[in-house]
Amino acid sequence: MFFNRSRMKVGLKTEKGGLRLAFLCIILTLCAGFAQAQQPEDVKKALRLIDIEQPTKGLAAMEQAVKANAAGENAAAYQYYLGLAQIRTGALDQALASFDKGISMNEKEPLNYAGKGHVKLIQKNPTEAKPLLDKAVSLAKSKNIEAQKAIAEAYLQDSKFLLEAIQILSKVKSSNPEDAEGAILLGDAYLAQNNGGASVSSYENAAKADAKNGKAHYKIGMVYQRSKNNPVAIEAFDKAVAADPEYAPAYKELGEIYYNMKEGAKAAKAQESYVKITEKPEQGRMKLAFYYFMAKDYAKANEIFKDLSTKPNPSIVLLRFYAKSLAEVKDTTGSRRVFEQYFATAKPEDIEAGDYNAYGKLLQMMKDDSLAINAYQSSLKLEPKQPELLQLVAEAQFKSKKYKESADTYKKMIAQRSRVLSQDYYSIGRSYYYSEQFAAADSAFTKLIELQPNMTVGYLWSGRSKAQLDPETETGLAKPVYEKLIEKAQVNPEKSKNELIEAYRYLGSYYYSNKQDIAQSKTYWEKVLALDPKNAQALEVLKEMKKQ
């Protein structure tokens, strides 16, 4: 058999050309599939607006993108993206309508079946969701990454389908490791499994794939915040806003973390950025006011509180903090007005002991001690164990000359103290003394002397109490205490001048009236005059002594 070698060469060349052409067609088809599978830039921008809490702008941008592509071959896919945006803004009925429209436009487009299944799973209706997602799976080519992601994102709404979601997203990762959104969804899936390590790794992959993706770092921060690892969470949120300076959720979480860490100034700074970006700043402004309050920037806090308090039905929490913040800047009249509004609005079970405490302090600042005591008593009914508050009540009662009530309150306070202070014995002793409970007063001052043996005040008041128990100086009950006072006062006689005068007067009277020891009595009265030359009592007594 003879062969035409030239024809044979041509044949081989033609055959190779055909193979090359076929292979090129496959590549082009795959590339077209990938190109079709990639999320369009206008869609990315619209969804990002929703992510940064500007949903109205995001939906408007998505609707514009749908209109711009209404006549294109991807019109049905754009209906899915519109529905996805509506899901992310909570408009589930509108999302279903968008998906139905997409299906009517192209029954072979898997995205809209995935979208409908997504809504059904959110609505806790897996029975209707499963056939829709199965349909999406049957229509989706393995290389259609967007369809695979849509199916997986739907599966993530129900823990029963978590493994299916991970399998799909793992394939997406293998097909296109640079798909940031796919990596984020895979991280979400691992997090739903409580696999924090794998979750963070996947989010990190997303961050590497898209350097401007704030969402990836934000998600990492949320993982660490969940485990209460604040330093690492803060670092991740900082990276989120560095990658995308408009990523509002990261600022919000930074504010929360700093607030919980009692770093008010940092919390306020983060929240300021959040409020500037978010589409609905009202709730954010309220938090900002709280952060200003913590940072002791009461002027800025009051600006926001004032504005929000004029809205219909202001919250009781707002009124509570507004009243306290006004008190901090000494706007007592304004603070009292807001406190009264708060107490009139709040349900009894919502009022806290601390509210009455703050109100009581305000009333004391306004010199209304009687009402302040009532406020404190209301606080103590809610929370009886408050030794510091009992001290305030007792002090107010003493100031109002309600000495017996003051003594009773101090007694309760001392019973609650983990460690009784010398000041406590001084305070209750004086309340006992002025309510003429002299034995109890002397007991309190004796304990004061035990705690502060080198201070003259305990001896002074113990001497007074004993003198009241021995008004005719028959037994000289106070004599040893006053003598001890003199001994202690000699350390600094100028500082203790008044105490010494009192002690000398007592001893002078004791020797004069009880012992009839004129010489000894005269000595003490002369000591009084040495300290106070114009002391009328000493002058009168010495004058009488001369006559005798």
Image (cartoon, rainbow, N blue to C red):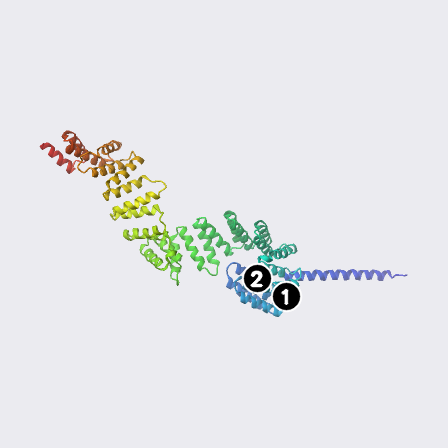
Q: Is residue 354 above or below residue 54?
A: above
Residue drawn 50% across the image and 64% down it: 56
- The residue pinned by badge 1 equals 109
State which mark lies toward you, 2 or 1: 2
Q: Is residue 318 left or right of residue 471?
A: right
Q: Residues within 10 Å of mark 1 (few under 14, many from 20)?
A: many
Horizontal and vertical percent position of residue 326: 35, 54
Q: How many marks?
A: 2
Horizontal and vertical percent position of residue 392: 31, 47
Q: Is residue 531 visible?
A: no
Q: Is residue 65 left or right of residue 365?
A: right
Q: Amino acid at mark 2?
A: Leu
Q: Classify the position of the N terminus by image quarter.
A: bottom right
Kind of element beneath mark 1 = loop
Please say if the residues under marks 2 and 1 sit with CB atoms less than 8 Å apart.
no
Q: Quadrant of residue 336?
A: bottom left
Residue that protrudes farthest toward the top in the picture: 519
- The residue pinned by badge 2 equals 121
Q: CA distance from mark 2 to mark 1?
A: 20 Å
